[in-house]
Amino acid sequence: MQNSLHRNTMKKILVLVNPKARQGHLVEEEITAWLKENGYEVLDHKSTPKRPMTEVIDDFAKESPIVLVSGGDGSVREALPALIRHNLPLLLIPSGTANNLARTLNIPTNTKDALELLKTGQIHVVDTGIVNGIPFMNVVGLGLSTQVNRVVQADLKRWLGVFAFILTAIKVLLRMTPFWVQLEFDGKTHNAFSWQVSICNGRNYGNGLVIHKDASLEDATLHGLSTETKKWWHSFILIPALITGKFKHENDVTSFSGQTIQLRTKRTMHVDVDGDVRTTTPLKIRVLPRSLRIFIPVESNQT
């Protein structure tokens, strides 16, 4: 559902930039200059630097600002609890590695084009998810993705972007073994040995992979995929299907969906949430329907 903008009353902007991003300070200067030139009031929170995004948003919530986040999916996840708590609209300036939320909603990756959404865009209401009490926007994953996120070098990630993850994934796969997992969803139970389990809110995860061709940020449903190939190198054969979300053979993957999903493993495993390792198994995951307001292009319908 789309809400019309009340531009006369939505002129205060809280700017939050990922401090770890390449040339983050230059991006912030560009954003601030554009906002001031276009008549927006930029709220100042620089007196207490390096505070968590949620604390900054909590402090300024009474001002009812638009919250501008410049970063990737992890930055959105960091701000998400406060955005949901105060029902504040999000303007996303994509500057991360994967930018799956931006991809799903057709948000421009060019900074100035994304800023123009304040003038030409609309506020859209979308679903989020919560895992073990942690709100998330895109994906909860364990297995290959978590091991890669734990060992990928920060410098490599900063300079090579997605290629850093690809190189690290190949190294990890060479020494990885599948793990036992039990999934409960919509009254069903599934046991398997898996290389990777991904549970998504929305359509895109990883570097633009598609969890299910019909998945949406508006369907109040979580969609999951368990990769259960017999040999590790079979995973590379599945890449075309992972990109499109259309699988010709079901032997190597299990697709599942539900409003609530529970997951157990025999041994405690680390779990990544929107690209950052944040919790461990067992998992209790549920969708939070219509819980986030976000600026998108008027013509966007890929939710």
Image (cartoon, rainbow, N blue to C red):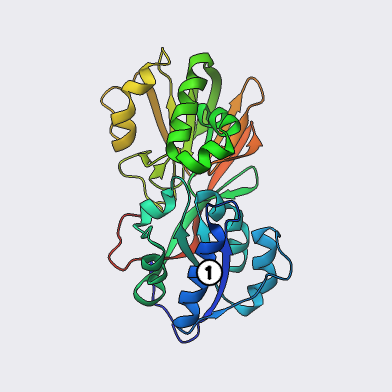
Screen quadrant of the N terminus: bottom left
Observer-nearest of 91 and 188: 91
Residue 46 quadrant: bottom right
- Residue drawn at x 39%, y 68% is 112
- Residue drawn at x 52%, y 52% is 22
Question: Residue under circle 1?
Answer: 29
Tag count: 1
Q: Position of residue 210 (x, y in %)?
A: 35, 40
- 29 is higher (above) or lower (below) than 182: below
- Residue drawn at x 51%, y 60% is 70
Q: Residue furthest bottom?
A: 8
Amino acid at pointer 1: Glu
- Residue drawn at x 56%, y 32% is 152
Is 81 positioned to the left or the right of 246 in the image?
right
Q: Position of residue 226 (x, y in %)?
A: 44, 27
Is 111 positioned to the left or the right of 21 in the image?
left
Q: Position of residue 99 (x, y in %)?
A: 43, 50
Screen quadrant of the C terminus: bottom left
- 179 is higher (above) or lower (below) than 87: above
Q: Residue furthest right?
A: 48
Residue 189 visible at all: no
Observer-nearest of 59 and 2: 59
